């Protein structure tokens, strides 16, 4: 799949994180949408195809785990990567138990590793799409 056809949604309440991650992922060829409010991110997923979502765990009004659960209900194939500067073992385990396929610690010191994690999510998505296509589900 052409990377321009892969939509990555980034949800974070910090504008500098949104703009930095947008630049990095657009330079890697992805189509990127940013949201700074959980409600806006959920509305976007309801009305658009999102292939990969990067979600901050600590957000005002609604935590990232809640957003993760809602996104997975709307679109089970969306690959979700959780992010946090304030991670605990409980948060990481909760994210994985609720369907996240990866977890990033902020700040992102290694940009190449960050992009590699997004690429891994892309590969997982493509593998699931292939399986579903072969079974006639899509």
Image (spheres, rainbow, N blue to C red):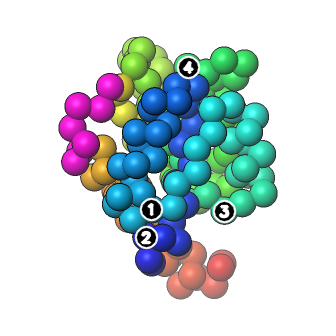
Which mark is in front, 3 or 2? 2
**What is the crowding at mark 4: few (fewer than 14 residues within 10 Å), some, or many (at least 20)?**
some
Which residue is labeled 3 in the image?
49
Q: Marks 3 and 2: CB-CB under 8 Å?
A: no
Q: Marks 2 and 1: CB-CB under 8 Å?
A: yes
**What is the crowding at mark 3: few (fewer than 14 residues within 10 Å), some, or many (at least 20)?**
some
Query: Of callouts 1 and 3, which one flags the residue occurring earlier in the amino acid sequence?
Result: 1
Residue in front for this viewpoint, 92 or 4: 4
Separation of marks 1 and 4 at Cα, in angstroms: 25 Å
Separation of marks 2 and 4 at Cα, in angstroms: 29 Å
Residue 22 included in the magenta stretch of the image: no
Q: Marks 3 and 4: CB-CB under 8 Å?
A: no
Separation of marks 3 and 2 at Cα, in angstroms: 14 Å
Residue at figure coordinates x 63%, y 84% from the top left: 136
Residue 88 placement (x, y as % from top left): 40, 15
> In which image quadrant can residue 51 be found?
bottom right
- How many numbered discs sit on the rendered protein? 4
User: What stretch of residues is rendered in magenta?
Assistant: 107-113
Query: Of callouts 1 and 4, which one flags the residue occurring earlier in the amino acid sequence?
Result: 1
> In which image quadrant can residue 60 be found?
top right
Which residue is labeled 2 in the image?
3
């Amino acid at each position: 799949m052409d990377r321009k056809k892969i939509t990555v949604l980034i949800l974070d309440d910090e504008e500098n994180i949104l703009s930095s991650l947008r630049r990095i992922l657009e330079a890697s060829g992805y189509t990127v949408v940013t949201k700074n409010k959980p409600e806006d991110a959920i509305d976007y997923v309801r009305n658009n195809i999102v292939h990969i979502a990067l979600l901050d765990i600590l957000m005002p009004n609604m935590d990232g785990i809640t957003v993760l659960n809602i996104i997975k209900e709307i679109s089970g194939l969306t690959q979700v990567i959780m992010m946090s500067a304030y991670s605990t073992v409980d948060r990481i385990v909760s994210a994985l138990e609720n369907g996240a396929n990866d977890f990033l610690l902020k700040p992102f010191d290694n940009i190449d590793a960050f992009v590699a994690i997004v690429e891994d999510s892309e590969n997982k998505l493509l593998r699931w799409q292939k399986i579903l296509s072969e079974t006639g589900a899509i």
